[in-house]
Image: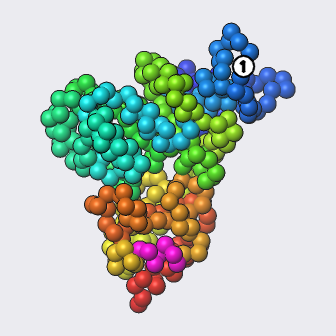
């Protein structure tokens, strides 16, 4: 078994853990990679019993992600399956405080549960730390603080340590969606968060060919509650998808380093372009958001006019993609109509800029 990042006897760095964690034991003729176990049924009286309760391929993935995040991981069929698993922990009638700018699926899930009387939610500016703490304090039924940092697609960064400390003083559980930052840039569990969430579809898998989600926790009781609920609901990933995600994680550090370097370069260049009125980049990661002159129509022209950048709604793959987020009706009204989210891939930086600059020049000709 691979050591976790919190194991003082083996303080492996994240890049090493990404490559080594979740591997089979190094024994003669053992495979380097955990095999794909295609099984719905196991011989009785063991630890697995049935395919909904466990799979060796899941175990390898969960060990690797748990090592990177510093906790115990559980795999899910999608990022939204992980989202709904967390919300299932919220008691009837309890409150949730969440960012006003967040993944639309998460916000829609909150809205759906609220419309059915399961819970009530308040959307806040997650960067206004005092206001977030005040809102948690005002709601005596608040049970969960939902945090994205950076937020999607506004790329706002929250004060995680202070928010987590304040929430815990109020006996409020904290979940942090770490999809954008990845465990290579941010470790919310080390700041005291109770649950870390990933859409593993994105940077972890990294090749635009998998749908998968994950949760990571340190508390054994929370892990058991989530595991028991997953067993019951069947929100489990397929073994092949899990294997692909684990294989993608082996190169996460290389992909992220390359994409981040390009993202920083593009953010600097975009700041200078006359068609761009605002650049949002938190200084790390591979997502850049820009607001273009001319609002929604100009942004629509931009996403249609690039040749190398693909117009797509997902992100975190080796391919560079871009999207005007307000084309979705569920996107927050406080997101500018002309905001375009860029997911920077690992292509040549000069080629990416040349393609983007040509399209921007058509929006704002000299």
Q: Which residue is drawn at 36% across and 58% down?
A: 331
Q: Which of 184 and 232 is in front in this view?
A: 232
- Span colored in magenta: 299-305
* Count of residue discs: 1
Q: In this view, does 327 lie above or below 97?
A: below
| For residue 11, above or below residue 84 | above
Q: Give the labeled residue for mark 1.
A: 42
Say if the magenta span includes residue 304.
Answer: yes
Q: Report the residue at 72% width, 28% height from top.
A: 39
Comparing 275 with 350, the one in front is: 275
- Residues 224 and 366: in front is 224
Q: Residues within 10 Å of mark 1 (few under 14, many from 20)?
A: some
Residue at image position (74%, 15%) is 43
In-image side of 80 versus 57 (left or right) = left
The figure's colour scheme reads rainbow
- The quarter of the image holding the N terminus is top right
Which of the 4 image quadrants contains residue 33? top right
Give x and y (percent) for residue 66.
Answer: 53, 30
Q: In which quarter of the image is residue 278?
A: bottom left
- Compared across the picture, whether 330 is left or right of 264 comes to left
Question: Magenta part mainly helix, strand or loop?
Answer: helix
On the image, the x and y values in percent for residue 354 come to 55, 76
Residue 295 seen in this snapshot: yes
Q: Is residue 38 magenta?
A: no
Secondary structure of the residue carrying tag 1 is loop
Q: Quadrant of residue 49?
A: top right
């Amino acid at each position: 078994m691979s050591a976790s990042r919190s194991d003082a006897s083996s303080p492996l760095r994240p890049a090493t853990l990404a490559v080594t964690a979740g591997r089979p034991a190094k024994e003669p003729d053992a495979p380097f990679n955990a095999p794909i176990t295609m099984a719905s049924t196991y011989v009785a009286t063991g630890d697995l019993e049935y395919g909904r309760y466990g799979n060796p391929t899941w175990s390898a993935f969960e060990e690797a992600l748990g090592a990177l995040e510093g906790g115990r991981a559980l795999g899910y069929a999608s990022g939204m399956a992980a989202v709904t698993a967390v919300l299932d922990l919220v008691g009837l009638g309890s409150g949730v405080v969440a960012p006003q700018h967040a993944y639309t699926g998460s916000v829609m899930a909150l809205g759906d549960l609220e419309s059915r009387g399961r819970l009530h939610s308040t959307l806040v500016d997650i960067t206004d730390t005092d206001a977030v703490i005040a809102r948690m304090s005002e709601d005596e039924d608040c049970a969960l603080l939902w945090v994205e940092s950076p937020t999607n697609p506004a790329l706002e960064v929250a004060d995680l340590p202070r928010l987590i400390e304040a929430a815990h003083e109020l006996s409020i559980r904290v979940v942090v969606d770490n999809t954008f930052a990845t465990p290579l840039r941010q470790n919310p569990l080390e700041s005291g968060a109770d649950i870390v969430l990933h859409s593993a579809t994105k940077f972890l898998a990294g090749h635009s060919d998998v749908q998968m989600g994950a949760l990571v926790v340190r508390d054994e009781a929370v892990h058991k509650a989530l595991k028991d609920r997953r067993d019951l609901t069947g929100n489990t990933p397929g073994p092949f998808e899990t294997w692909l995600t684990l294989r993608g994680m082996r190169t996460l550090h290389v992909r992220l380093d390359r994409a981040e370097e390009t993202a920083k370069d593009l953010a600097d260049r975009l700041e200078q372009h006359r068609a761009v009125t605002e650049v949002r980049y938190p200084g790390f990661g591979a997502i850049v958001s820009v607001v273009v002159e001319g609002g929604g129509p100009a942004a629509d022209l931009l996403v249609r006019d690039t040749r190398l950048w693909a117009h797509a709604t997902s992100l975190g793959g080796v391919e560079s993609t871009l999207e005007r987020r307000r084309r979705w009706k569920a996107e927050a009204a406080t997101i500018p109509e002309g905001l375009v989210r860029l997911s920077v891939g690992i292509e040549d930086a000069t080629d990416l800029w040349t393609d983007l600059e040509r399209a921007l020049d058509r929006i704002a000709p000299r």
